[in-house]
Image (cartoon, helix red, strand yellow):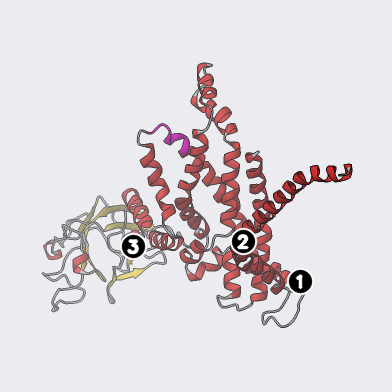
Amino acid sequence: MTATTLVHKEASPPAAGATRRRRTRRRGRIVALLFVFPALLLLGALVVYPVLFSVGRSFFDASGTRFVGGGNYTEMFRDPATVKAIRNTAIWVVVAPALLTGLGLILAVLVEKVRWATAFKLLLFMPMAVSFLAAGIIFRLAYDEDPDKGVLNAAVVSVHDAFAGTSSYPTARARDGQDLTRGRDGSYLTATPLSPGDSVALGLVGVLPKDLPQGASPAAAAPHRAAPGELRGVVYLDFTPGGGGRPGKVDPKESGLPGMKVEATRDGRTVASTTTAGDGSFRFTGLDDGSYAVKLPAANFAPPYQGVSWLGPALVTPAIIGAYLWIWTGFAMVLIGAGLAALPRDALEAARMDGANEWQIFRRITVPLLAPVLTVVFVTLVINVMKVFDLVYIIAPGPVQEDATVLATQMWLVSFGGGNNQGLGSALGVLLLLLVIPAMVINVRRFRRSQR
Protein backbone atom coordinates (compact mmCIF):
# COMPACT_ATOMS: atom_id res chain seq x y z
CA MET A 1 0.00 0.00 0.00
CA THR A 2 1.42 3.33 -1.04
CA ALA A 3 1.75 6.44 1.16
CA THR A 4 -0.81 8.31 -0.88
CA THR A 5 -3.47 5.68 -0.18
CA LEU A 6 -2.71 5.80 3.54
CA VAL A 7 -3.07 9.60 3.65
CA HIS A 8 -6.39 9.42 1.78
CA LYS A 9 -7.77 6.81 4.18
CA GLU A 10 -6.70 8.82 7.25
CA ALA A 11 -8.35 12.04 5.91
CA SER A 12 -11.67 10.51 4.87
CA PRO A 13 -13.34 10.19 8.34
CA PRO A 14 -13.07 13.95 9.18
CA ALA A 15 -14.31 14.88 5.70
CA ALA A 16 -17.28 12.57 6.10
CA GLY A 17 -18.12 14.18 9.48
CA ALA A 18 -18.03 17.68 7.98
CA THR A 19 -20.33 16.52 5.20
CA ARG A 20 -22.80 15.08 7.73
CA ARG A 21 -22.78 18.32 9.71
CA ARG A 22 -23.50 20.35 6.55
CA ARG A 23 -26.35 18.01 5.69
CA THR A 24 -27.77 18.32 9.21
CA ARG A 25 -27.60 22.11 9.06
CA ARG A 26 -29.21 22.13 5.64
CA ARG A 27 -31.95 19.81 6.87
CA GLY A 28 -32.49 22.07 9.90
CA ARG A 29 -32.81 25.12 7.67
CA ILE A 30 -35.35 23.33 5.48
CA VAL A 31 -37.40 22.25 8.52
CA ALA A 32 -37.26 25.81 9.92
CA LEU A 33 -38.42 27.22 6.60
CA LEU A 34 -41.29 24.74 6.50
CA PHE A 35 -42.44 25.92 9.93
CA VAL A 36 -41.96 29.60 9.07
CA PHE A 37 -43.52 29.33 5.60
CA PRO A 38 -47.20 29.61 6.75
CA ALA A 39 -46.35 32.75 8.74
CA LEU A 40 -44.44 34.21 5.79
CA LEU A 41 -47.35 33.35 3.50
CA LEU A 42 -49.81 35.14 5.79
CA LEU A 43 -47.43 38.08 6.18
CA GLY A 44 -47.10 38.39 2.44
CA ALA A 45 -50.85 38.06 1.82
CA LEU A 46 -52.01 40.36 4.60
CA VAL A 47 -49.20 42.93 4.77
CA VAL A 48 -46.75 42.96 1.88
CA TYR A 49 -49.24 42.49 -0.96
CA PRO A 50 -51.75 45.13 0.34
CA VAL A 51 -48.92 47.64 0.82
CA LEU A 52 -47.56 47.10 -2.68
CA PHE A 53 -51.06 47.13 -4.18
CA SER A 54 -51.92 50.39 -2.38
CA VAL A 55 -48.71 52.02 -3.59
CA GLY A 56 -49.52 51.02 -7.17
CA ARG A 57 -53.19 51.96 -6.84
CA SER A 58 -52.27 55.45 -5.61
CA PHE A 59 -50.95 56.29 -9.11
CA PHE A 60 -54.33 55.67 -10.80
CA ASP A 61 -57.59 57.59 -10.90
CA ALA A 62 -60.80 56.79 -9.01
CA SER A 63 -61.83 54.10 -11.51
CA GLY A 64 -58.39 52.51 -11.47
CA THR A 65 -58.07 52.52 -15.27
CA ARG A 66 -56.20 55.77 -16.00
CA PHE A 67 -52.63 56.38 -14.80
CA VAL A 68 -52.38 59.82 -13.15
CA GLY A 69 -48.87 59.63 -11.72
CA GLY A 70 -48.55 61.90 -8.70
CA GLY A 71 -51.92 63.55 -9.32
CA ASN A 72 -53.50 61.95 -6.25
CA TYR A 73 -50.67 63.14 -4.03
CA THR A 74 -51.03 66.68 -5.40
CA GLU A 75 -54.80 66.64 -4.90
CA MET A 76 -54.32 65.25 -1.40
CA PHE A 77 -52.50 68.38 -0.21
CA ARG A 78 -54.91 70.71 -2.01
CA ASP A 79 -58.04 69.20 -0.46
CA PRO A 80 -59.10 71.26 2.65
CA ALA A 81 -60.52 68.16 4.36
CA THR A 82 -57.24 66.29 3.96
CA VAL A 83 -55.22 69.26 5.20
CA LYS A 84 -57.49 69.39 8.26
CA ALA A 85 -57.00 65.65 8.77
CA ILE A 86 -53.21 66.11 8.68
CA ARG A 87 -53.50 68.98 11.18
CA ASN A 88 -55.67 66.92 13.53
CA THR A 89 -53.30 63.98 13.24
CA ALA A 90 -50.41 66.28 14.20
CA ILE A 91 -52.41 67.42 17.26
CA TRP A 92 -52.98 63.80 18.23
CA VAL A 93 -49.30 62.92 17.82
CA VAL A 94 -48.11 65.89 19.89
CA VAL A 95 -50.73 65.85 22.66
CA ALA A 96 -51.94 62.29 23.31
CA PRO A 97 -48.59 60.40 23.68
CA ALA A 98 -47.09 63.18 25.82
CA LEU A 99 -50.10 63.28 28.15
CA LEU A 100 -50.30 59.50 28.37
CA THR A 101 -46.60 59.11 29.11
CA GLY A 102 -46.75 61.82 31.76
CA LEU A 103 -49.89 60.39 33.38
CA GLY A 104 -48.47 56.88 33.26
CA LEU A 105 -45.24 58.03 34.93
CA ILE A 106 -47.05 59.94 37.69
CA LEU A 107 -49.48 57.12 38.39
CA ALA A 108 -46.73 54.47 38.34
CA VAL A 109 -44.74 56.41 40.95
CA LEU A 110 -47.80 57.09 43.12
CA VAL A 111 -49.12 53.54 42.92
CA GLU A 112 -45.90 52.28 44.52
CA LYS A 113 -46.91 54.11 47.67
CA VAL A 114 -50.49 52.78 47.70
CA ARG A 115 -51.32 49.83 49.89
CA TRP A 116 -53.62 48.15 47.37
CA ALA A 117 -51.33 48.79 44.41
CA THR A 118 -52.33 45.67 42.44
CA ALA A 119 -56.06 46.42 42.70
CA PHE A 120 -55.44 50.03 41.68
CA LYS A 121 -53.42 48.95 38.63
CA LEU A 122 -56.13 46.47 37.67
CA LEU A 123 -58.78 49.18 37.94
CA LEU A 124 -56.84 51.57 35.69
CA PHE A 125 -55.97 48.82 33.21
CA MET A 126 -59.55 47.57 32.84
CA PRO A 127 -60.49 50.05 30.05
CA MET A 128 -57.96 48.25 27.85
CA ALA A 129 -60.35 45.29 27.87
CA VAL A 130 -63.11 47.47 26.38
CA SER A 131 -63.21 47.61 22.59
CA PHE A 132 -62.82 50.98 20.90
CA LEU A 133 -66.35 50.56 19.54
CA ALA A 134 -67.83 50.15 23.02
CA ALA A 135 -65.65 52.95 24.43
CA GLY A 136 -66.77 55.24 21.62
CA ILE A 137 -70.44 54.57 22.36
CA ILE A 138 -69.85 55.15 26.10
CA PHE A 139 -68.18 58.51 25.53
CA ARG A 140 -70.66 59.53 22.83
CA LEU A 141 -73.35 59.24 25.51
CA ALA A 142 -71.17 60.86 28.20
CA TYR A 143 -70.53 63.87 25.95
CA ASP A 144 -74.21 64.31 24.98
CA GLU A 145 -75.32 67.95 25.13
CA ASP A 146 -78.61 67.08 26.83
CA PRO A 147 -77.93 67.18 30.61
CA ASP A 148 -80.57 64.47 31.05
CA LYS A 149 -78.41 62.10 28.95
CA GLY A 150 -74.80 63.30 29.08
CA VAL A 151 -73.20 62.73 32.49
CA LEU A 152 -70.54 65.39 31.93
CA ASN A 153 -73.05 68.10 31.09
CA ALA A 154 -75.24 67.00 33.98
CA ALA A 155 -72.30 67.64 36.33
CA VAL A 156 -71.42 70.97 34.67
CA VAL A 157 -75.04 72.18 34.80
CA SER A 158 -75.37 71.16 38.46
CA VAL A 159 -72.25 73.13 39.42
CA HIS A 160 -73.30 76.13 37.32
CA ASP A 161 -76.82 76.25 38.77
CA ALA A 162 -75.46 75.89 42.31
CA PHE A 163 -73.41 79.08 41.92
CA ALA A 164 -75.18 81.11 39.23
CA GLY A 165 -78.75 79.97 39.69
CA THR A 166 -81.29 79.47 36.93
CA SER A 167 -84.52 81.08 35.79
CA SER A 168 -87.77 79.58 37.04
CA TYR A 169 -89.88 80.48 34.00
CA PRO A 170 -87.89 79.94 30.78
CA THR A 171 -91.06 79.25 28.75
CA ALA A 172 -93.23 82.07 30.18
CA ARG A 173 -94.48 84.85 27.91
CA ALA A 174 -97.01 87.66 28.05
CA ARG A 175 -100.53 86.88 26.90
CA ASP A 176 -101.65 88.76 23.79
CA GLY A 177 -103.58 91.90 24.71
CA GLN A 178 -101.71 92.45 27.98
CA ASP A 179 -100.27 95.87 28.78
CA LEU A 180 -96.73 94.52 28.31
CA THR A 181 -94.22 95.17 25.55
CA ARG A 182 -91.23 92.95 24.98
CA GLY A 183 -87.76 94.47 24.75
CA ARG A 184 -84.93 93.33 22.51
CA ASP A 185 -83.19 91.66 25.45
CA GLY A 186 -86.25 89.51 26.21
CA SER A 187 -87.59 91.57 29.12
CA TYR A 188 -91.18 92.82 29.49
CA LEU A 189 -92.15 96.41 30.31
CA THR A 190 -95.55 97.90 31.10
CA ALA A 191 -96.71 100.23 28.30
CA THR A 192 -99.02 102.39 30.42
CA PRO A 193 -97.24 104.82 32.81
CA LEU A 194 -97.82 104.08 36.52
CA SER A 195 -97.66 106.32 39.57
CA PRO A 196 -97.34 105.67 43.32
CA GLY A 197 -100.73 104.49 44.56
CA ASP A 198 -101.43 102.44 41.41
CA SER A 199 -101.62 98.66 41.16
CA VAL A 200 -101.06 96.43 38.15
CA ALA A 201 -101.79 92.78 37.27
CA LEU A 202 -99.30 91.15 34.91
CA GLY A 203 -100.63 87.94 33.42
CA LEU A 204 -98.27 85.46 31.78
CA VAL A 205 -98.86 82.19 29.97
CA GLY A 206 -96.66 79.37 28.72
CA VAL A 207 -96.03 77.75 32.12
CA LEU A 208 -97.50 74.34 32.85
CA PRO A 209 -99.24 74.15 36.24
CA LYS A 210 -97.08 71.12 37.13
CA ASP A 211 -93.94 73.20 36.54
CA LEU A 212 -94.88 75.89 39.06
CA PRO A 213 -92.40 76.23 41.95
CA GLN A 214 -93.29 74.82 45.34
CA GLY A 215 -95.00 77.40 47.49
CA ALA A 216 -97.02 78.94 44.67
CA SER A 217 -100.44 80.05 45.97
CA PRO A 218 -103.58 81.46 44.30
CA ALA A 219 -103.04 84.94 42.90
CA ALA A 220 -106.57 85.95 43.92
CA ALA A 221 -105.39 86.09 47.54
CA ALA A 222 -102.90 88.86 46.73
CA PRO A 223 -103.89 92.38 47.78
CA HIS A 224 -104.46 94.31 44.57
CA ARG A 225 -105.07 97.78 46.00
CA ALA A 226 -102.03 99.95 46.66
CA ALA A 227 -101.67 102.21 49.66
CA PRO A 228 -100.78 105.85 49.11
CA GLY A 229 -97.12 106.27 48.14
CA GLU A 230 -96.57 102.67 47.03
CA LEU A 231 -96.70 100.82 43.71
CA ARG A 232 -98.21 97.38 44.02
CA GLY A 233 -98.96 94.53 41.65
CA VAL A 234 -99.20 90.80 41.02
CA VAL A 235 -97.54 88.52 38.46
CA TYR A 236 -99.74 85.48 37.84
CA LEU A 237 -100.34 82.58 35.49
CA ASP A 238 -103.26 83.72 33.35
CA PHE A 239 -104.61 80.23 32.90
CA THR A 240 -107.45 78.48 34.71
CA PRO A 241 -107.10 74.68 34.92
CA GLY A 242 -110.20 73.13 33.38
CA GLY A 243 -111.11 76.33 31.51
CA GLY A 244 -113.62 79.04 32.30
CA GLY A 245 -111.23 81.83 33.22
CA ARG A 246 -111.27 85.38 31.89
CA PRO A 247 -108.17 86.46 29.92
CA GLY A 248 -106.44 89.42 31.51
CA LYS A 249 -108.29 89.01 34.83
CA VAL A 250 -107.12 87.30 38.03
CA ASP A 251 -109.50 84.36 38.55
CA PRO A 252 -109.84 82.37 41.79
CA LYS A 253 -108.11 79.23 40.49
CA GLU A 254 -105.18 81.05 38.85
CA SER A 255 -101.82 80.81 40.56
CA GLY A 256 -99.28 83.49 41.34
CA LEU A 257 -95.74 83.20 40.00
CA PRO A 258 -93.39 83.35 43.00
CA GLY A 259 -89.70 84.20 42.77
CA MET A 260 -90.15 86.49 39.76
CA LYS A 261 -87.79 89.47 39.79
CA VAL A 262 -89.61 92.78 39.26
CA GLU A 263 -88.11 96.26 38.77
CA ALA A 264 -89.53 99.77 38.93
CA THR A 265 -87.95 101.95 36.23
CA ARG A 266 -88.03 105.68 35.64
CA ASP A 267 -86.63 107.32 32.50
CA GLY A 268 -85.05 104.00 31.54
CA ARG A 269 -83.21 103.61 34.88
CA THR A 270 -84.01 101.02 37.55
CA VAL A 271 -84.93 102.79 40.80
CA ALA A 272 -86.19 99.80 42.82
CA SER A 273 -86.36 96.03 42.55
CA THR A 274 -88.04 93.22 44.45
CA THR A 275 -89.12 89.59 44.11
CA THR A 276 -92.67 88.27 43.97
CA ALA A 277 -94.13 86.41 46.93
CA GLY A 278 -95.83 83.00 46.84
CA ASP A 279 -99.05 84.53 45.53
CA GLY A 280 -97.14 86.52 42.88
CA SER A 281 -97.59 89.85 44.68
CA PHE A 282 -94.96 92.59 44.83
CA ARG A 283 -94.79 96.19 46.00
CA PHE A 284 -92.45 99.15 45.85
CA THR A 285 -92.42 101.71 48.65
CA GLY A 286 -90.67 105.02 49.10
CA LEU A 287 -91.07 106.07 45.49
CA ASP A 288 -91.09 109.75 44.62
CA ASP A 289 -94.00 111.23 42.76
CA GLY A 290 -93.77 110.79 39.02
CA SER A 291 -94.29 108.33 36.19
CA TYR A 292 -92.91 104.77 36.45
CA ALA A 293 -92.90 101.52 34.49
CA VAL A 294 -92.80 97.99 35.90
CA LYS A 295 -90.24 95.73 34.28
CA LEU A 296 -89.87 91.95 34.28
CA PRO A 297 -86.13 91.48 33.51
CA ALA A 298 -84.98 89.03 30.86
CA ALA A 299 -83.27 86.93 33.56
CA ASN A 300 -86.72 85.63 34.55
CA PHE A 301 -87.16 84.06 31.13
CA ALA A 302 -83.60 83.02 30.30
CA PRO A 303 -83.36 79.47 28.94
CA PRO A 304 -81.70 77.05 31.35
CA TYR A 305 -77.95 76.57 31.10
CA GLN A 306 -77.35 73.53 28.91
CA GLY A 307 -73.68 72.94 29.64
CA VAL A 308 -70.72 72.65 27.29
CA SER A 309 -70.89 71.60 23.64
CA TRP A 310 -68.27 68.87 24.05
CA LEU A 311 -68.81 67.55 20.54
CA GLY A 312 -68.97 70.95 18.86
CA PRO A 313 -66.39 71.98 16.25
CA ALA A 314 -64.12 73.64 18.83
CA LEU A 315 -63.91 70.83 21.41
CA VAL A 316 -64.56 67.61 19.48
CA THR A 317 -60.87 66.70 19.03
CA PRO A 318 -59.89 67.34 22.69
CA ALA A 319 -63.00 65.39 23.76
CA ILE A 320 -62.00 62.36 21.67
CA ILE A 321 -58.42 62.59 22.98
CA GLY A 322 -59.92 62.50 26.49
CA ALA A 323 -61.65 59.21 25.65
CA TYR A 324 -58.37 57.87 24.28
CA LEU A 325 -56.57 58.81 27.51
CA TRP A 326 -59.17 56.90 29.52
CA ILE A 327 -58.43 53.75 27.54
CA TRP A 328 -54.63 53.89 27.34
CA THR A 329 -53.51 55.43 30.65
CA GLY A 330 -53.49 52.00 32.29
CA PHE A 331 -51.28 50.62 29.53
CA ALA A 332 -48.69 53.37 29.99
CA MET A 333 -48.82 53.05 33.78
CA VAL A 334 -48.23 49.27 33.74
CA LEU A 335 -45.27 49.47 31.33
CA ILE A 336 -43.63 52.33 33.21
CA GLY A 337 -44.38 50.58 36.52
CA ALA A 338 -42.53 47.50 35.27
CA GLY A 339 -39.52 49.68 34.45
CA LEU A 340 -39.82 51.39 37.82
CA ALA A 341 -39.75 48.03 39.62
CA ALA A 342 -36.43 47.21 37.91
CA LEU A 343 -34.67 50.38 39.08
CA PRO A 344 -31.71 49.88 41.47
CA ARG A 345 -33.08 50.67 44.92
CA ASP A 346 -29.61 51.38 46.32
CA ALA A 347 -29.39 54.53 44.17
CA LEU A 348 -32.71 55.80 45.54
CA GLU A 349 -31.78 54.98 49.13
CA ALA A 350 -28.38 56.62 48.74
CA ALA A 351 -30.08 59.80 47.50
CA ARG A 352 -32.42 59.79 50.50
CA MET A 353 -29.51 59.33 52.88
CA ASP A 354 -27.77 62.29 51.23
CA GLY A 355 -30.78 64.46 52.09
CA ALA A 356 -32.59 64.58 48.75
CA ASN A 357 -36.36 65.04 48.93
CA GLU A 358 -38.86 62.98 46.91
CA TRP A 359 -39.20 65.60 44.16
CA GLN A 360 -35.42 65.76 43.67
CA ILE A 361 -35.22 61.95 43.60
CA PHE A 362 -38.03 61.82 41.04
CA ARG A 363 -36.57 64.52 38.80
CA ARG A 364 -32.85 63.70 38.99
CA ILE A 365 -32.80 59.91 39.48
CA THR A 366 -36.10 58.21 38.66
CA VAL A 367 -36.87 59.98 35.37
CA PRO A 368 -33.29 59.71 33.93
CA LEU A 369 -33.12 56.00 34.78
CA LEU A 370 -36.57 55.44 33.24
CA ALA A 371 -35.70 57.36 30.05
CA PRO A 372 -35.40 54.20 27.86
CA VAL A 373 -38.77 52.89 29.07
CA LEU A 374 -40.42 56.29 28.65
CA THR A 375 -39.08 56.53 25.10
CA VAL A 376 -40.45 53.10 24.20
CA VAL A 377 -43.87 53.96 25.64
CA PHE A 378 -43.94 57.34 23.90
CA VAL A 379 -42.93 55.98 20.48
CA THR A 380 -45.38 53.07 20.77
CA LEU A 381 -48.19 55.48 21.52
CA VAL A 382 -47.15 57.74 18.63
CA ILE A 383 -47.51 54.77 16.26
CA ASN A 384 -50.87 53.93 17.82
CA VAL A 385 -52.40 57.41 17.61
CA MET A 386 -51.45 57.74 13.95
CA LYS A 387 -53.77 54.81 13.25
CA VAL A 388 -56.67 55.90 15.48
CA PHE A 389 -59.94 55.43 13.66
CA ASP A 390 -62.70 53.87 15.76
CA LEU A 391 -63.01 56.57 18.41
CA VAL A 392 -63.02 59.42 15.92
CA TYR A 393 -65.56 57.77 13.65
CA ILE A 394 -67.95 56.80 16.48
CA ILE A 395 -67.75 59.76 18.86
CA ALA A 396 -67.76 62.66 16.38
CA PRO A 397 -71.34 63.42 15.19
CA GLY A 398 -71.97 63.73 11.47
CA PRO A 399 -72.02 67.55 11.29
CA VAL A 400 -68.58 67.81 12.93
CA GLN A 401 -67.05 64.69 11.44
CA GLU A 402 -64.88 66.81 9.17
CA ASP A 403 -63.67 68.92 12.11
CA ALA A 404 -62.51 65.80 13.98
CA THR A 405 -61.22 63.74 11.05
CA VAL A 406 -57.71 62.27 11.09
CA LEU A 407 -55.77 60.56 8.33
CA ALA A 408 -57.20 57.10 9.04
CA THR A 409 -60.82 58.28 8.99
CA GLN A 410 -60.20 60.51 5.97
CA MET A 411 -58.69 57.57 4.09
CA TRP A 412 -61.81 55.50 4.81
CA LEU A 413 -64.23 58.32 3.98
CA VAL A 414 -62.49 59.08 0.68
CA SER A 415 -62.28 55.42 -0.32
CA PHE A 416 -65.54 53.89 0.95
CA GLY A 417 -67.55 56.46 2.92
CA GLY A 418 -69.11 58.19 -0.07
CA GLY A 419 -66.05 59.45 -1.94
CA ASN A 420 -65.47 56.18 -3.84
CA ASN A 421 -62.03 57.41 -4.88
CA GLN A 422 -59.71 54.55 -4.01
CA GLY A 423 -56.84 56.21 -5.85
CA LEU A 424 -56.85 59.18 -3.48
CA GLY A 425 -57.58 56.87 -0.55
CA SER A 426 -54.54 54.74 -1.42
CA ALA A 427 -52.40 57.87 -1.56
CA LEU A 428 -53.60 58.74 1.95
CA GLY A 429 -52.74 55.22 3.08
CA VAL A 430 -49.23 55.55 1.66
CA LEU A 431 -48.82 58.89 3.43
CA LEU A 432 -49.90 57.30 6.71
CA LEU A 433 -47.41 54.45 6.16
CA LEU A 434 -44.58 56.89 5.51
CA LEU A 435 -45.41 58.76 8.71
CA VAL A 436 -45.48 55.57 10.79
CA ILE A 437 -42.23 54.06 9.46
CA PRO A 438 -39.80 56.45 11.26
CA ALA A 439 -41.43 55.74 14.62
CA MET A 440 -41.29 52.00 13.93
CA VAL A 441 -37.60 52.21 13.02
CA ILE A 442 -36.85 54.08 16.27
CA ASN A 443 -38.68 51.42 18.27
CA VAL A 444 -36.92 48.51 16.54
CA ARG A 445 -33.49 50.07 17.04
CA ARG A 446 -34.17 50.66 20.71
CA PHE A 447 -35.31 47.06 21.17
CA ARG A 448 -32.12 45.80 19.53
CA ARG A 449 -30.04 48.09 21.70
CA SER A 450 -31.71 46.84 24.85
CA GLN A 451 -31.12 43.20 23.81
CA ARG A 452 -27.40 43.85 23.47
- Name which residue type carries label 1: Gly
Q: Residue at x 16, y 66 (%)?
A: 255
Whether the residues at callouts 1 and 2 have beta carbons within 8 Å, the answer is: no
First-in-chain label (3 vs 2):
2
Per the image, the residue denoted by label 3 is: 149
First-in-chain label (1 vs 2):
2
First-in-chain label (1 vs 3):
1
**Region rendered in magenta:** 108-114
Per the image, the residue denoted by label 2 is: 34
In this rendering, the label closer to the viewer, 3 or 2 = 2
Q: Secondary structure at mark 2?
A: helix
Q: Residue at x 65, y 51 (%)?
A: 439
User: Marks 3 and 2, Cα distance to the nearest angstrom?
Assistant: 57 Å
Q: Nearer the viewer, residue 132 or 263?
A: 132
- How far from the left and from the top, in percent, is residue 65? 71, 83
Q: Is residue 180 magenta?
A: no
In this rendering, the label closer to the viewer, 1 or 2 = 2
